[in-house]
Amino acid sequence: MDIFVDVILGIIVVGAFGALSYAIKIVSVSGLLAGLVVGLTVWLFGGWSWFVLILLFHLSAAFFTKFKYKRKAKAGLAQEKGGAREWPNVMANGGFPAICAALEGLVVFLSLPGEIFLFGFIGAVATMCADTIATEVGLLSKQTPRLITHLGEKVEPGTSGGVTILGELGALIGTVIIGGGGWLLSSFGVQFTNSGTNFGVFLLIIAIVSGMLGCLVDSIIGATIQGIFKCSVCGKITEKAKHCGEKSIYQRGIAFFENNMVNFVAATIGGVIAMGLFLIII
């Protein structure tokens, strides 16, 4: 009976946030459907407290994407379609956290020692929150971005692998949002599996460390492996193989290795780092 109630409640809550996200153009139709899959997986296998953490990422990403959107759009740097996320972006960001939630649910069902997958979840979500906020805030920086692999080299705003001080501060804010959310939930008595007295502090620390390192990995992959092109119409450097309605000119990286792949790999690495830290610290 409890499971039935949890499923119904999950459908109602996750569905309500999904409908709201679509209504205010945070996600497209495909993004909405992918978000329902990720959200329900997290709710049903991780629990409502896990859902709160990934919801914090979702809302934070939406806020910073919309923040000064017109200014970013005028510079040709804003997300397309008003920042509404499509299903590939949703799955790239939420895929590994959903896997961690499902594995945690399996561990609990089998009555095995758990919590490592919670930290994988935290690390992945913190990485994606850090990366998203770093990107959106960094686009507003008055400082010229520098390539993460060659800090002496200046690059155009929006270039994959380009970093600014403002962007890095944004990344830190992203990790604190997720880690702080976990710490607050733990402080108010929410139990993440077998959480102890200092569990919230560990969540905060590991979220910050793994999130910042995962975001760093994202920038390095963006500067080295990700496919980069030049628009044959406007001459703009872009991550897209097609720009201004025409096929772009290949510049560097692996042509098919696009931004969503980078995000998924970075989220996975951030999650794995967090799991490693869990094994070392706790």
Image: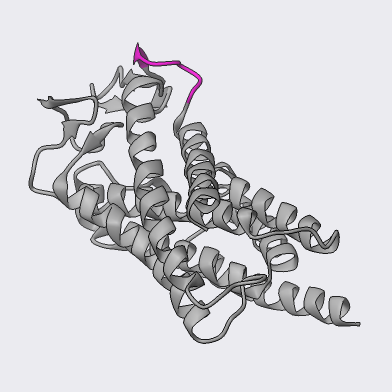
The colouring scheme, among rainbow, by chain, secondary structure or one colour, is: one colour
Instruction: From the viewer's perspective, tell me whether residue 147 is left or right of residue 134.
Output: left
Q: Is residue 184 above or below residue 231?
A: below
The stretch in magenta equals 249-257
Can residue 244 be seen in this snapshot? no
Q: Position of residue 199 (x, y in %)?
A: 51, 70
Position of the N terminus, as image quadrant, is bottom right
Residue at image coords 41%, 55%: 129
Q: Position of residue 5 (x, y in %)?
A: 83, 82
The front one of 233 and 180 is: 180
The front one of 147 and 112 is: 112
Q: Is residue 245 above or below residue 90?
A: above
Can residue 200 be seen in this snapshot? yes
The front one of 47 and 272 is: 272
Q: Position of residue 241 (x, y in %)?
A: 43, 22
Q: Position of residue 274 (x, y in %)?
A: 49, 49
Q: Residue furthest bottom?
A: 188
Residue 45 on the magenta segment: no
Instruction: From the viewer's perspective, tell me whether residue 60 is left or right of residue 264.
Output: left
